Image (spheres, helix red, strand yellow):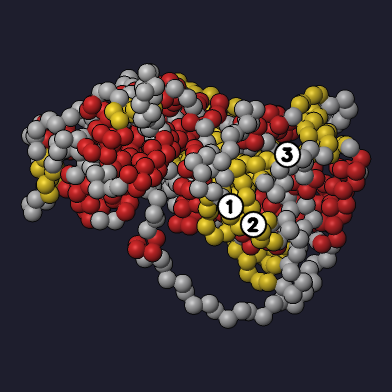
Amino acid sequence: MAKDTEKLIRQLSLISYLMAERRPVTALEIRRDVEGYSGMNEDAFARRFYADRAELESLGIQLTVEKPADGVAEQENYSLRPENFHLPAIAFTDEELASLQFALTLLDGEFAYAEPLRLALQQISWGRPSPLNSPDQGSIALGVTASAGGHDLSQRLAKIETAIFRNKTITFDYYTMERDTVGARKVDPYHLLFQGGQFYLLGRSHERDAIRVFRLSRIRGKVAYATKAEHDFKRPTDFDPRAYAGRADWQFGEPLGQADVWISERIAWQVERHFGRYGDVRPAESGPGEGDIVFSTYYASVRQLAAWALRLGEHARIQGPDDLVAEVAERVERLHDLHAGDTLELPAATPAAPAEEAVPEPTAASRRETAIRPERFARLVTLASILIQAGRASELLRIGDVTDALQVSEAELREDVAVLNVVNFGGGSYVLYAEIRDDGTIEVDPEPYSDNFARPARLLPVEAKALIAAIDLIGDHLPEGALTSARTKIVKALGADPMEQGLQVASGTGDDSGIARVVSNAIVASKLLRLEYYKANEDQFTERVIEPYALINGREGWYVASFDPQREAVRHFRLDRVKNAAVLDETFTPRPEVDPAADVDGWPRTGEVEASRVARVWISPDRARWSREQRRVAQELTDGSVVVELPYKGTDWLVREVLAEAGDAAVVSPPEAREAVRAAVDRVRLAVR
């Protein structure tokens, strides 16, 4: 029997034994009665029992340890309070359960926490029709994944999750993009942050003796524990992860100063709504427009602030401090020089490297972990409750139904059933006995041995985190109230907010939640929607009356997928460009030919819309490393610069992307795109002056 299976049997049997006894028991009784311990000598038992207690604690299951009051016996007594294992009942409404189910539907397979999310939904819907079987709301679709980013990165995420919960110092090799080097790191992990499609680790770097942010995709190799101790550090009480989730791109790092940015009245509403929380807004004392504002914000990165301001074109101008103004002006001049001629002369291309042989995927055996994944423990507890319920109802379970519910293979299900069949609670009595029959069904002995697993267990930390993370990731983009009220109930039942204990899901830079709620309500009611919409490429406002069908999340933000009767076509409108939205009284009949989510696997994820053209863009040696990580590199050049390919449909989008590179990018082709950047740079130069 594999060591991880033995460990699972011991831990589940220990829980069942302590719950069944309902009294403090001694280590001697545990060693004698609990499956998996009886064959051990005293030293081996002490080591295994200590390790099992620590691992159960990391799963959120806390044993109570007592010493006899008379002090005669030095032996400790152990018990497990029901509230430390069972989850308090949560009274969800049908709407809340449907919204939670829909969150899983959206994120399943595209979310690093999809498996614990599914198991958590099984737990919280105990005694109710499963939300997994409720009808699809169909009013929202996701075009951006929240996956961990591959097998290796998922492994690191799981290891870091456990290290955060157990307060274990970790070591790993890290690639520092700024210095283009790989070095060893020793970190006390405090928190995880999910922002902009990436996972980040917040923790104290031993090398710097300061809190640092590490992007998980830049960790190289394995993550390991620094010591064998049960705990290595205690997280400072004044550490607040929300401070990191509430920063703009230009605010990561040590503050360098306070910048004043003039914003024209044309987009003042947009900057105030989406970026106002990163600084202060006041009316401009002078300027061409009465509604001009000054946005004051602290900055830690000159380049990132310059990139943000330049992306806004002639509608933004940095006014101070003087050294910041000078650097931005210098970057604008660099942009001008790079686009001064009809062509851009490039260094020679680097000779193509010989093709590398494909590395085979690791086999299941080579990927097997020695530590038990929290998801496996949760899956067994959930499966036990399913089997016990069927046994008491004298019902046969179809293998396919169970594998579908838990998203496991038949082989994994057979292994899990075999484990549960030997879980005991002392004295030779077992929790359940299930037999997988040749006709594709599972028969469970109806004898009700125990209630230990017949009630939902507490959510493990990773399950609670998955549930709240899914809610926070989707945010306010479902009809108002459903997910928000469900979140409140879950946190109350848990006794703490999981987001304060390990993972923070940061909202995007745009705050479109108010618009999203208006749009969601119109979608649900099938009512026409009036939009006041800002067309950035034409720098003008337009009014549209549309039939809204769904909210779609894409690389650039959230969109409403709609049918525009005036143009007799499907149109997508970005929510961050909607100045005002109003639901009209007039209803519409949904058109069967309109499939608003049909494109969700296309341009929302890739950025390549139908009829996209491809621009070749030169990236400087200083920024080439970032482009290799994010873009499609077409050519490597001898000076370290690269040429990337950027698909685009609207030239205005391409212009903003090049301006946002702040002098480190230039269009090579096509000529008309190069000319468009040159014209935009000329307008910015006039504004800067």
Which quadrant, please, contains the N terminus?
A: bottom left
SS category of the residue bearing label 1: strand
Marks 1/2: CA distance? 7 Å
Which quadrant, please, contains the C terminus?
A: top right
Residue for point 71% across, 43% down? 209
Q: Earlier in the sequence, mark 1 or mark 2?
A: 1
Within the image, what quadrant is residue 392 found in?
top left
State if disc 2 and disc 3 touch (CB < 8 Å): no
Check disc 3 and give the amino acid type.
Answer: Gln
SS category of the residue bearing label 3: helix
Residue 545 seen by the camera: no
Question: 209 or 687, which is in the foreground?
Answer: 209
Whether residue 187 sits left or right of residue 268 in the image: it is: left
Check disc 1 and give the amino acid type.
Answer: Thr
Q: Nearer the viewer, mark 1 or mark 3?
A: 1
Q: Earlier in the sequence, mark 1 or mark 3?
A: 1
Residue 151: percent from the left, percent from the top?
A: 45, 57
Pointer 2: residues within 10 angstroms few (<14), some, or many (20+)? few
Residue 199 seen by the camera: yes
Whether residue 273 sits left or right of residue 336 in the image: it is: left
Which mark is drawn over residue 184? 2
Q: Earlier in the sequence, mark 3 or mark 2?
A: 2
Residue 202 in the image: above or below residue 611: above
Residue 316: percent from the left, percent from the top?
A: 79, 39
Marks 3/2: CA distance? 26 Å
Marks 1/3: CA distance? 27 Å
Q: Which residue is mark 3?
A: 251
Check disc 2 and give the amino acid type.
Answer: Ala
Q: Which residue is mark 1?
A: 171
Pointer 3: residues within 10 angstroms few (<14), some, or many (20+)? many
Question: 322 or 380, which is in the foreground?
Answer: 380
